[in-house]
Amino acid sequence: MNYITAGREPFAPYRYFEEISAIPRCSYDEEEIAEYLCAFAKNLNLWYHKDEYNNVYIKKPGSPGCEGLDPVILQAHIDMVCEKNLGTTHDFKNDPLDLYIENGRFRARGTTLGADDGMGVAFMLGILAEKDAVHPPLECIFTALEEVGLIGAIKLDYDLIAGRRMKSLDSGPEGGMLVGAAGGCKMIITLPIKHQPLEKDGVIMAVRIREAIGGHSGSDIGKERANANKLMGRILSRLSRSGVKYEICDVSGGISYNAIPRECDAVLCVSADCVESLGEIIDCMQREISDEYKDSDPNIRVFLERADALQSLDAASTHSFVNMLDLLPSGRMTMSVVHSYLVTLSLNQAVVTTEDADVKIVYSLRGAKKSALKDLTCSLADMAKLLGGQIEIHDGYPAWEQRQNSKLCEVMLDVYHQLRGKDAFVQLVHGGVECGIFVDRLPDLDVVATGPDADMVHTPDEWLDLESFGRTYEYLLAVLKALAGQK
């Protein structure tokens, strides 16, 4: 293939990032990328194993003189969040990502980039292919289904893992040593609805929310960005309180349960004599929202368009739906008193869909402490039930609490200082990561996660800094050399 990073050194991680970006790898569609990894290992005569969930294990012996050392685990996930801008024709099941470089950053036209966690996969492939690297025996674990509840890590066969030091490659920014993260779960709220024929004098109008920033529902939940679904609940509630007569035909917003929704549409059947008032209220709310989010989410647009519909919800279903959208909470709940930057409890109203017999609202909930997360989950469930909803809770995963006196962290901090001439920093995050599951299954495991500079994950504005990507790869090689005792 033609590499847009040809000539950039060290070439290995750039090459493999481009190669895996040509392979479809949305969650639940990881068969092809898993087969690519197996073929890669076979070509290098490395031991490998693929399980039924498309997790792939690859082992590489230690470099000469290091064969008998304790192994080191490298870990990254192979799936990506597949989001795209409206109007983008990209087919995630068949099309390669359309990569380009802008201002020294990898980007993808109109879609998520998949640097989360394609960058980690590329690092591991580069190291496995390196002939001259100095390192202990390596156990490379490529997990599947991370973005939909850390399912691959939950389903791993931990009997295949001998190492007790793990370097996760699903983090950032450069220089950050991640040593703890939140636990979480997914809740699906189902609200039964009834439909009716359209009102004879009704006018079909669509309220549309566009150009919110969105972002990761863990790492970005404390940045005061708008949640398009919650904004729509607020708008519909305002219309009801203002006397606009309407029934909902359809509401849809959000795509991924771990992304803050950027867009939402509500198709309404509006009484003809209320159309003018509808327009005035939407104009007013556009001004209000623009003012409220001018610093954190400045480009949000709220506007009206004519639309089509075949039926609407009846009045009772419309009332219940609006109440649920508006009254159920979303966003950060508590902050750490120890680390002022750290959200410790949150919930995200991620996806809303209107179906034939019911409405579904999907939430992601996160908490640094199991007890607080449990109470928040119970409270949200109770509120949803009071509003007429039915509850399902899925995909719970444990928090990863900081390990005191981590020897691996000490080595990594020391190597970073020697290599860069400045100190790295230790951090905790509110995002859910697989490290918590690994530590839950292997309690004596020493884990640190690092990565390069990247941002806007889970959105089509995602980017990966090329220079930082290359430096982080070189740092990883230096860490492995230090762990082999070859400083």
Image: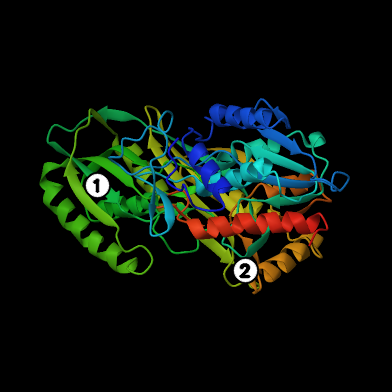
* Residue 192 drawn at (x, y percent): 42, 33
Q: How is the image coloured?
A: rainbow
Location of mark 2 (residue): 336
The circle on residue 59 is none
- The N terminus lies in which quarter of the figure? top left
Residue 160 lies in what quarter of the image? top right
Secondary element type, mark 2: loop
Q: CA distance from mark 1 to mark 2?
A: 37 Å
Residue 212 lies in what quarter of the image? bottom left
Closer to the camera, 297 or 392? 297
Secondary element type, mark 1: strand
Q: Is residue 244 left or right of residue 273?
A: right
The circle on residue 207 is 1
Residue 196 lies in what quarter of the image? top left
Residue 78 in view in this figure: yes
- Pick whichever of labels 1 and 2 is earlier in the sequence: 1
Q: Residue at x 59, y 36 (%)?
A: 145
Q: Residue at x 36, y 69 (%)?
A: 295
* Residue 429 drawn at (x, y percent): 61, 60
Classify 10 Å Cα crowding around label 1: few (below 14), some (14-19), many (20 and above). many
Closer to the camera, 109 or 215? 109
Closer to the camera, 184 or 440? 440
Q: Residue at x 57, y 46 (%)?
A: 12
* Residue 443 drawn at (x, y percent): 82, 49
The amino acid type of the residue labelled 1 equals: Val
Q: Is residue 458 left or right of residue 407?
A: left
Compared with 376, 141 (above or below) is above
Classify 10 Å Cα crowding around label 2: few (below 14), some (14-19), many (20 and above). few
Q: Is residue 208 left or right of residue 274?
A: right
